Amino acid sequence: MNTLTSTLEKPSLLQAVLEGLMDGVLILTDQGEWLHANDCARKICRQLSSVAAQSNRIPQEIWRACEALINSLSLYADQAIIIENEITAQESATYRVRVQWLQLEAAQRPCILVTLEDRRQSLHNLAITEGQKYGLTPREADVWMRYRANYTYKQIASELFISQNTVKKHMKNIHAKRQIAIDADA
């Protein structure tokens, strides 16, 4: 696989930043060749299609968004366009795909920047942040993370080995703490 740093003498700050991101980042040519993929992007591509990840080809679900961007070039040549889509892997993981043009000095033609966001991980991180903001207890934070991930009260109770009434009690406390935080911000 060709990488961004193959044309450079030493690893760049850009590559270090891309590898450190929580989101998957792919940089492609308009022909679908991988110029760079961080570890997260390679993992997501493997989940979507093991054949594609091994051959450095883009999974079809992602390439469709890239094709939409390429096809939009003639219509919106002078505008910055971002194509977004959500795809679901076989393991029921949901990913937000964002595709946009990227001009790199080392490349003669514009490249395609693909950002792959793991929605489950994003919701988990959001729930942690909200738990701290609202002053939730550790158990309330456990309940809140599952609630934000669209678990039912029954699923939350089962996973945390508590009754549904206990889940309801925790949710009542969480909503009260949320309201206090909202009122304090107003």
Image (spheres, rainbow, N blue to C red):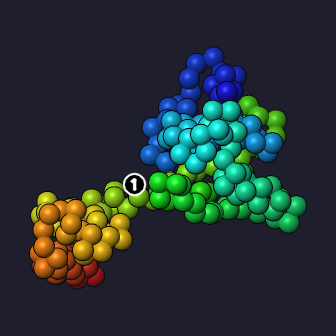
Q: Is residue 44 left or right of residue 143?
A: right
**x, y percent for residue 146:** 28, 65
Badge 1 crowding class, 10 Å Cα cut-off, few under 14, some 14 to 19, many 20 or more, is: some
With respect to residue 12, does 20 lie above or below? below
With respect to residue 118, does 166 lie above or below? below
Please name the residue shown 13% across and 73% down the image: 163
How many labels were placed on the picture? 1
With respect to residue 178, does 18 lie above or below? above
Q: Is residue 177 left or right of residue 56?
A: left
Front-most of residues 149 and 92 = 92
Q: Is residue 121 left or right of residue 49?
A: left
Mark 1 falls on what kind of element?
helix
Q: Which residue is mark 1?
A: 121
**x, y percent for residue 136:** 15, 66
**x, y percent for residue 142:** 20, 62
The quadrant the C terminus occupies is bottom left
Q: Quadrant of residue 29?
A: top right
Please name the residue shown 56% across and 41% down the image: 46
Please name the residue shown 76% across and 60% down the image: 68
| Disc 1 residue type (three-letter) | Gln
**x, y percent for residue 27:** 66, 41
